[in-house]
Structure formats: structure tokens, C-alpha cells
Image: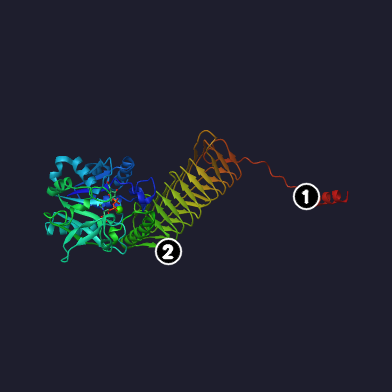
Amino acid sequence: MLGILLAAGRGTRMKSARPKVLFEINDEPICFPPFRALFEVCDRVIIVVGYRGAEVRESLLKRANEAFGEEAVKAKVLFYTQEEQKGTGHAVRTALDGLGKSLGSYEATIVLNGDLPLIRESTLRPLVSEFVARSLDALCLSFDAADPTGFGRILRDDKGLLLGIREEKDASESERKIREVNGGVYCFRNTLLGPALAELKTDNKQNEFYLTDLLGTLKQPKLKTEAIVSNAEDLLGVNTTFELADLRQLSQRRLKKDLCERYGVDFVNIDSIFVSARAVFQGPCRVGPGCSIMGSSVIGEDVNLEGHVLLKNSRISKGAHILWSSVIDESIVGERTKVGPMAHLRMNTVLGDDVKVGNFVETKKTTLARGAKASHLSYLGDAEVGEESNIGAGTITCNYDGFNKFKTKIGKRAFIGSDSQLVAPVSIGDDAYVGSGTTVTEDVPAGALAISRPDMVVKEGYAKKLADKRNLTKKD
Ligand code: UD1
Ligand code: CA
């Protein structure tokens, strides 16, 4: 089986310079779900690109490599460029021209429009089985549209036999009333596909080569073609940004339902939560209201994301608890570790097991080893914190001198007093103490105490003396 994905069009009704197939649903390009379905069913997949083709190719490859591995993708996937977008029939011809003689190694071809983000492998199963069972030459999936506007209408005779597909712009008043429409999913017998495409004409309102002209007895009396009614939801397409918004909601619900059924993910206030299709769940866990799980994040078993937590390309290990409104970006959180509320972990922060990072703590390129704590109001950048160390409230690593970034290294079981500044590069040994309010500018050896703080002075009766002085000046 050969698969062809049509992704060369611009999508003018989106009113954007961005190619339609690169708008995102569930944090992946619109054209990825139909690509995935083809990848799972076909022996080879061709993607026809055109408008901003290099970008489409790059985005699709990136996502495909992430999902299936570079080797598998390289072995199966080819891109061809349709220089001028002369219609869906012309796009398929471009793919076949590219493939040349090796077309003969495939019996049939599945063609999918690239703008069908709800397509899945199961949508294609009845297409293939019906095609084979009835030894058809061409088959397409149709559906009953509540509003058929914009779709090609399925024309049938009294007996229900397929006469053809009429594009909206070419349709008569009465044809426009037909609600059975073409879904943009096709299967063709390869021996006939090439010759039939060569005969296509552009005798229509859009002056295009319509792939849809290959179906129905009106234009192809010798071929055995059919349209079968399929699940309407799977075939919903994107033509405008409003349709995109609608499909985003639908596909989010579908994705989350699957996660509930497969892993027992407990979504609290499910419609307020966003989950990327690229995220991986490892078992039952709880996701509170307003959370956004973006990119290729991994969520372990028994994790609790309390609410309004934003995760991006991060790994949250088993039993971790992320409290309200924390932001975790490109970071790793260990088992049973507690983060937040309102903590910000970013750029390769790595927290070990049983760590605690509390409110208003920001970390960047920082490691906290097992059992370390930074409970309140700190900035830890380019730092390494050893096991069981305690970082006091308000501690700041001064990692930037205006030109370069420097590292702070803190050993095991160290105690950094509140409101200290660690001026990097600097290191603090195992079991060392830093007195509260200290500005650390030199290395502190293991087991030592570092303290830089002027001696405190107490002036008894100061308030009264001050008040007396004020009263004197008033009388004057
Ligand atoms: C097409 C069908 C219509 C069907 C609808 C379903 C045709 C002629 N019409 O209409 O019957 O109801 O899909 O969604 O096929 N593309 C190319 N090269 C081109 C033109 C298009 O690669 O030269 C790609 C587009 O990127 C898109 C897909 O083909 O992914 C469909 O094109 P689009 O313009 O959206 O077709 P519709 O007018 O929606
Ligand atoms: Ca379309």
C-alpha cells in the first residue's frame, strides 16, 4: 500500500501567510494526524509539499522523527514538491511522477487531504477493507454534513450508484442542497490511477485538476468506483480559523478521554486543561484545573499537578507533587519531590528525589540532589546543590557579572542562611554553614562557617530620645 498526503496548498481561507497544514492542534501540526494514519497503514508515504514547502517538510519531519524514530521515517517517507498548486489531481500526479517506476511495487494508493486532523488509523480500516472486498478501482469516504458548505457533494442516481463528486463552486442550486459530502479520503487501484490522472481536465470553475473527477460513472464510466458513508467526526476538516478552534476543542476532548480510559488520568475540570498529543502519561495521576501540559512532557504515576501548572517538555517523576501555578520548562523533577506553589523551574533544572522547591523560587540550569531544599524566595542559576543541603529564604546565586555566567557549587548537607548572596564562581564544601545575610565571595571549605555581617549595635532608649528631639524642634 502506498500513501499520499496532500499538503501543498496555502489555505487561503485561513487568511494567514502561514501554511494551513502547519497550524497546530494538540501541540502538533494539523497535517501530522493524517500522516500518522498513513504511516501506520502504508508501506511507503509520500508527502506533496508546495507553498512554503521547506517549512512544511521540516515541521512534519521533526514531529515524525519524534514519534517513530529517524530511521523508520527515513526508510518510509518521501517528499515531492508541487511547484504550482494546480489542484488535488495534479498534486497526486506530482507524487506519482516523483515515484516513477517503483509505483508498480504497490497495489493500491491511499490519498489523504492534509487538513484532516481528526483522521486516525481506524478511519482508514473500512476504506481498505471495502476496497479489497468489493475489488473496486476507486473508493472515497463520504459523510453526512450538518452544513455541507464548502465540500464536494456526492451525486448518486436513483439506485444510489455513485455518479460523481461536484465541487461547491461548480454545483447547481439543487446539487448544493445535497448533504452527503466528500471527506477527502481516497483509495485507488494503482494500475488505473496513472492513466486516469493523465486524462484529467481543468474544465471547471477553479481551473484545477480535481482528484474528485476520478470517482463516479459520469466521468469514469469504465471504472468501478464507490463512496461509503463514514464517521463524520473523523472527517472534519479545517478551512477557517474558527473551524480550527472548534476542532481543537473536539480533539482535546478525544485525547483526554483516551488518557482517562488508558491510564486512569484524573482530570479535574477537564475542559480547562490542555494536553499535548506529544505528552506521555505513565499511569494514574491527577491533573488539576487550568493545567497546560505542553510539548513532549512525561508525567509519572501518582503525580499530582494541583492546578494552573504549566509544564513544557519536562519530566515529572512518580509521586511528585506540583503545587498551584508553578511553571516547569525543559526540566526534570524527581520522585516524591514537591514544587511550588508559584515556583519557576527552567532550562535544564534537574531536581532529584525528595527535593523541595517552594514558593517564589526560580531555578535555571541548576541541580538539586536528593533531599535538598530551597523553600522560599530564591534565585538559583548555574548551580549545583548537594544532597540534603538547605538553601535559606532569599538566597541568590549571583551568576552573571554583566558579561559571563559563572557556577556555584554547594556540597552535601550544607546550610545556607537566609538572605545570602553567593557570588559565582564560588563553591561551598560539604557540611559547611553560611551565616544569614552573608555575601559569599570566596570558597568555603567543608565543615566551615562563613559569615560577613557587621556587628549588631543596640541603642537603648533610642525611640524616646528621638521623640524628645522632635518635640524640641517643634517648639522652635
Ligand atoms: C477538497 C475536495 C472536496 C472535499 C474536501 C474535503 C477536491 C477537488 N475537492 O476540497 O471534494 O469535500 O476536500 O475536505 O479535491 N492541495 C495540494 N495541491 C493543490 C491543491 C490542494 O496539495 O494543488 C492540498 C491542500 O494542501 C489540502 C488538500 O489538498 O491539504 C485539499 O485541498 P483544499 O483546497 O482544502 O480542498 P477543498 O476545496 O477543501
Ligand atoms: Ca479542505
The way the protein has been coloured in the rendering is rainbow
Q: Which of 271 and 372 is in front in this view?
A: 271
Report if the CB atoms under discs 1 and 2 are less than 8 Å apart. no
At mark 1, the secondary structure is helix
Residue beneath label 2, please? Answer: 269
Task: Classify 10 Å Cα crowding around label 2: few (below 14), some (14-19), many (20 and above).
Answer: few
As drawn, which residue projects farthest toward the right? 476
Quarter of the figure with residue 141: bottom left
Q: Nearer the viewer, residue 153 or 253?
A: 153
- Residue 262 lies, with reference to residue 437, above or below; the image says below
Q: Where is residue 410 in the image (x, y as percent from the top left)?
A: 50, 41
The kind of residue tagged 1 is Tyr
Q: Where is residue 42 in the image (x, y as percent from the top left)?
A: 20, 50
Q: Where is residue 173 in the image (x, y as percent from the top left)?
A: 28, 61
Residue 128 shows which numbered tag?
Answer: none
- Residue 453 lies, with reference to residue 161, above or below; the image says above
The kind of residue tagged 2 is Asn
